[in-house]
Image (cartoon, rainbow, N blue to C red):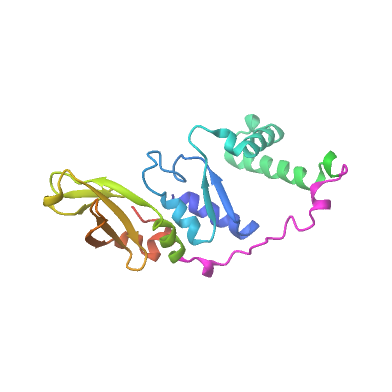
Amino acid sequence: MGDVRSLLLELFKQWGMPLAIRTDNGLPFGVPTRDVIPIMSLWLAAWGITPILNRPRRPQDNAKVERNQGTLSRWAEVHKCQNLEQMQVHLDEASTMQRDHCPVRRLGKVPRIEVFKDLYTPARVFDEAIFDEHKAYDYLAQAIYPKKVSVSGATTVYNKPFQVGAQHKGKIVFVKFDPKNVAWLFFDQLGHLLKTIPDPRFSRENLFNLTVCQ
C-alpha cells in the first residue's frame, strides 16, 4: 500500500483533495472477502474523502471511468510504449490534449479549459494538517462484525486473534470498534458487553502511514 499512498499524495498535492474516490473491490482499495472495512477506506476517510466501492462484478458502476481509460489508452498509443516512463509521457500529452486543445461539440466546439476556467485550480488544496484519524475511527465504528469464537476462545479481527474467553467457544459474538478508546468491543447475542480490547494497530501514526496491519 505504500506505493499507492505515495502516488495518491502526489495527486492530492497537484490536483487538490477530491470529495470522493470510487474504486473496485480489488486490493489495495478493497478487501476481496468484503468482511471488513478496507484499511484504504479508513485512510481516505481520515482525509475527508468518501470511499466508494463498486458492487462486485459490476464494472458499469464506473462506466465513465472505464470508457475514459479505453479512450486515453488509444490516444496515448500505450501499446507502442517501450517502458513506463515513455507511457507516462504519452499519457500526460494525451491528457493535456483532451483538456486544453480538443474541441467538444456539446460545449460549443471549444476545449474544456475554455469553459471550465478553474480546471487547474484545486477546490480543496492539499494540507497535511487536515488528516484526522477520528474521522477514520468514526467510519470504522459504523460496522458491526459477527464472529464465531474458536475452540480456544478467540476470534479474529483484521487478521489478529483476540481472546474473548473459552466459555464462549463455538458461539457467535458481535464486534464493534470503540472510536474513543481505539479498542474493540465484544458483545454476546443479547447485546451484553463481554470484553473491551485495545488495538494499537489503529494508532494515528499507523493510519497516516498506511501501516495498520503490517
Q: Is residue 109 on the magenta stretch?
A: yes
> From what the image shows, is residue 142 above or below residue 90?
below
Say which of 137 and 203 sits in front.
Answer: 137
> x and y percent of residue 113 in the render?
80, 51
Residue segment shown in magenta:
108-132
Residue at 35%, 60% (x, y): give it.
202
Residue at 63%, 59% (x, y): give it.
16
Q: Is residue 189 left or right of residue 123?
A: left
Q: Quadrant of residue 164?
A: bottom left
Residue 104 in sight in this render: no
> x and y percent of residue 207 in the render?
41, 60
**Residue farthest along the bottom direction in this orientation:** 129
Q: Quadrant of residue 104?
A: top right
Our reading of the magenta stretch's main secondary structure is: loop
Say which of 163 and 67 sits in front.
Answer: 163
Residue 206 in sight in this render: yes
